[in-house]
Every structure is written in structure tokens, then in C-alpha cells.
Amino acid sequence: MNISDILESVDAADFSDLASHGSGAQAQGDLQRLTRAWISERSAPELLIYPTDLMDRTMARLRTQARLSFAASPQYSISLTD
């Protein structure tokens, strides 16, 4: 499996549920950029530039997903900070 195979599997994913943090197309592009950054970082002999904007959007999506999960399970009372 190479990066093309990984990115093709990302292309086939459904991102319609991510509309709250931008369009599905933006979410798909972010996932591709995140995958490329991960693969590049793994194969680079030195540290690469941190993709701040990409990581900020990714973390915002993860916080939203966590809040929705915790809201659906009221027995958990966890405070998430921004």
C-alpha cells in the first residue's frame, strides 16, 4: 500500500456529517492534507513545519465530536476546553 492507495480510500469516504465545520469538500481536503503531512513526517529525517491551520481545524472537529458524544451519554461529565 502506498500513499496513492491511502488517498484513494480517503476520496471514497463520506464527509456529509462534517458540515458544521466547513463543507464536506473542505473536510475531505483536510483529511488528505493530514494524511500527507503524517506520511511526510514519518519519512522525513528532520522535523517539518507544523501545519497550524490544518491542525486547528482538525482539533476543532475532534472537540465537536467529543462534545456530541458526551452530550449523548450524560453519565460522563467531562469538561473540554478550547
Image (cartoon, helix red, strand yellow):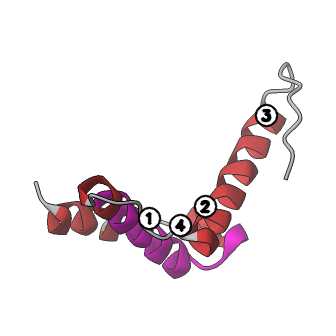
Residue located farthest toward the front when viewing the structure as drawn: 46
Crowdedness near tag 4: few (<14), some (14–19) or many (≥20) residues, C-alpha within 10 Å? few
What's the distance in space between the residues labelled 1 and 2, CA to CA? 9 Å
Q: Pointer 3: what residue?
A: 70
Query: Which dot, 1 or 4, sits closer to the camera?
Result: 4
Q: Quadrant of residue 26?
A: bottom right
Up-down relation of residue 52 to residue 64 (above or below)? below
Q: Pointer 2: what residue?
A: 58
Query: Which dot, 3 or 1, sits closer to the camera?
Result: 1
Q: Can residue 13 be seen in this view?
A: no
Q: Pointer 1: what residue?
A: 34
- Residue 51, percent across and down? 54, 70
Residues in magenta? 20-39
Which of 45 and 15 lies nearest the eye of the viewer? 45
Q: Which mark is residue 56?
A: none
For this view, does 43 lie left or right of residue 53? Answer: left
Q: Who's the residue at 62% across and 70% down the image?
A: 52
Crowdedness near tag 1: few (<14), some (14–19) or many (≥20) residues, C-alpha within 10 Å? some
Q: Which of marks 4 and 2 is nearer the N terminus?
A: 4
Q: Pointer 4: what residue?
A: 50
Task: Look at the image and say whether residue 30 sits in the magenta stretch.
Answer: yes
Query: Which dot, 4 or 2, sits closer to the camera?
Result: 4
Disc 4 residue type? Tyr
Task: Look at the image and say whether residue 44 sits in the magenta stretch.
Answer: no
Query: Which dot, 3 or 2, sits closer to the camera?
Result: 2
- Residue 19, percent across and down? 65, 71
Q: Who's the residue at 45% across and 72% down the image?
A: 28
Q: Which of marks 4 and 3 is nearer the N terminus?
A: 4
Up-down relation of residue 33 to residue 55 (above or below)? below
- Residue 48, percent across and down? 42, 66
